[in-house]
Amino acid sequence: MHFNKVVFGLKKTFCFSTILFITFHSVAQKKNEQFQVHIKKTSSRVVIDGQTNDQGWLDAEIASDFYMVLPMDTGKARVRTDVRMTYDEENLYLLAECYHLLKGPYYVESLRRDFVFGKNDNFLLFMDPFDDQTNGFSFGANAAGAQWDGTMYEGGKVDLNWDNKWNSAVINNDEKWVFEASIPFKSIRYKKGITRWGINFSRLDLKTTEKSSWAPVPRQFPTASLAYTGILIWDAPPPTPRMNMSLIPYVLGGVNKNYEAGTKSEFRKDIGVDAKISLSSSLNLDLTVNPDFSQVEVDRQLTNLDRFELFFPERRQFFLENGDLFSNIGYATIRPFFSRRIGLGTPIHYGLRLSGKLNEDWRMGLMNVQSAKQEEDNLPIQNFTVASVQRKVFSRSNIGMFFINKQAIGSVGSDSAKDAYNDYNRNIGIEYNLASSNNLWTGKLLLIKSFTEGNFSNEMVRTGHLQYQSRKWTIALQYEDVGSGYQADVGYVPRRGYTRLYPQVLRNFFPKGGIVLAHGPKITSSYFFTRKMAQTDYEHIFAYNIAFRSQAVLTPWYSNNYVKLLSPFDPTNITKDTLTRNTRHYWNAYGADFISKPQSLVTCSLSVRFGGYYANGKRTNVMAEIGYRWQPYLNISLATNYNRIYLPQPWGNVNFVLIGPRVDVTMSNKLFLTGFLQYNEQTENINLNLRFQWRYKPASDLFLVFTDNYLPENFGVRNRALVLKFNYWWNH
């Protein structure tokens, strides 16, 4: 049988299996329905000071007897955690007493907000106010008092880019650390009149390497999984949500100078404003006028040895909130909307975003952004619109439709720009996201069609995957089909005109004792074909995962690769010499990845790769990051990436060094200083970024940012910028 017939058969089997599973999709009762905690209104004022003697806490029901999630989810937690909740007309209150089992200091990374979960002793609250097991909110703190807050989406993911105003306090003693918080009802969204919320509490104690939760969660899932929340039962419906409006104006002053071009210094004086308006208990309108993102951290440099465009994540606040309704459509390499396409080289005039729940079953998102005219290339004003709507189906799945539009307002000025610029580009599609009631089965089906000026191709995107994940097994199959004529001007789709099959299998074994917690093989393969099913690439990776009880991880691996170049390619990405089209390249490689235990004050990660490369060459790659923390005030890290490439002439032997030391100083949970230096030999640039932040009031900040770029050979300044920015969060 020809291979393309096998692939076609797999495609049909895959689609049929997915449809069959959807047809018999379980709508079973909520998994942890029996785990219930009652909340009643406090009879006295609650003071947020970390003390447990307020009358409201003495009267509150205690949620205790947590279950162990890690190292193994087979019994009760060893560390004791007691949780209480109460409320009044304005706030929801939370008190968590996190007792110590072993003597010694707590482990935290810093006092910075939205810390890394696995590197901090922490307590987190996950709540699902609609009890739909899909969306919600998360609040918490580490043992030093740094806050954590975010919105929840896709049944268990937390978007930490969401910030809101709430108060908390943490105190420590020899017996326990205590976290106390007040969360204003106007800061969250919930359905009027509902008296059952999904809820769970999570605790990570690094001294014992134990992760636990109040309602039990299988170890293969995060404790944030809303499929496994218990029930918070109110004594009366929470206070009726009131309209809430926040204004966040900013003023900015700055100066920048381009030394390479020899131009004069340019001075900046800008003002702008963001507004957040709650239109209902669960629908929010965000507005921005003349936004500025100068305080956003610079991108981390990468050595680019790839044939396709690299991905850099969005860091601008306006585009990050409620990202699942906009930027999370599709897959990592098939994103019809990628917000970094907006505002490239031009300021944004205004933007609006309407997002949230319409009712228990429907969610919607609408975004419209308009950028200025690009004077350098004489390109017109551009308007960007994204609209999406989701309908909950079955217990935890959803089906959605989306529309993405990039539209020019005005005409393109130059003939050269007309050749590379479209007056419009539109994408319309439908996406089904599958999540079973117990989260063992997840999947997706996606169809997208693009419409572009002068391109009337019927090419589309057709993708899907189905995954089964249990404690011992992970089995998945993904299928991608991207047409040659498909176009997403506001998306990230680095490769077009291909069909791909991507199967993977992982098996875990659990020893009864010893230093190894779990181990097992992981096999992944990736097959690329032309649209006529002629094979162009494959990659087989055979890895063995070893997870230690200390939470260190070691993964040795071996890979087998084949590439047929469909266009000329420079394997160093620095010269004009290229390998010719249709040449075939085979190689094998091997290596290992290691992450040290997070409890150490000195931590490290190491990744090594040895083996073949294009044109019968060889490539050695070593990536390492070492960090030291003087908790909770200082974090020092050094990241390096070294590539040694052996190629025939005209390239010869090539070395690339990328090094990036970083210093994070958290003088308190209100004062932060970050210094970041990056030297990239491939791009011949040294970048320095210093950022000072003073959070003088909740969600209100003063930033001072200094940026420098240098030439490595003589440290000559290429360009330099200094910005002072002040914003204030005003609530009504």
Image (spheres, rainbow, N blue to C red):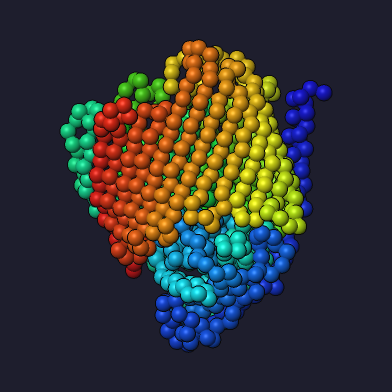
Q: Quadrant of the C terminus?
A: bottom left
Number of marks: 0
Does residue 336 appear left or right of residue 164 in this picture? right
Does residue 308 appear left or right of residue 632 in this picture? right
Task: Estimate the x, y position of residue 672 in percent, counting from the top left.
Answer: 34, 56
Q: Residue at x 58, y 32 (%)?
A: 609
Residue sticking out furthest to the top? 649
Task: Estimate the x, y position of residue 647 in percent, counting from the top left.
Answer: 53, 17
Look at the image and tell me whether residue 571 can be seen: yes
Q: Is residue 614 above or below residue 100?
A: above
Q: Residue at x 62, y 66 (%)?
A: 213
Task: Estimate the x, y position of residue 381 in percent, counting from the top left.
Answer: 33, 36
Residue 511 in which image quadrant: bottom right
Task: Estimate the x, y position of residue 132 in percent, counting from the top left.
Answer: 61, 63
Look at the image and tell me whether residue 435 can be seen: no
Does residue 568 appear left or right of residue 285 in this picture? right
Q: Residue at x 21, y 48 (%)?
A: 253
Q: Is residue 374 above or below residue 645?
A: below
| Of residues 493 and 116, the one drawn nearer to the viewer in this rendering | 116
Q: Residue at x 42, y 72 (%)?
A: 169
Q: Quadrant of the N terminus?
A: top right
Q: Is residue 122 above or below residue 232?
A: above
Residue 73 in which image quadrant: bottom right
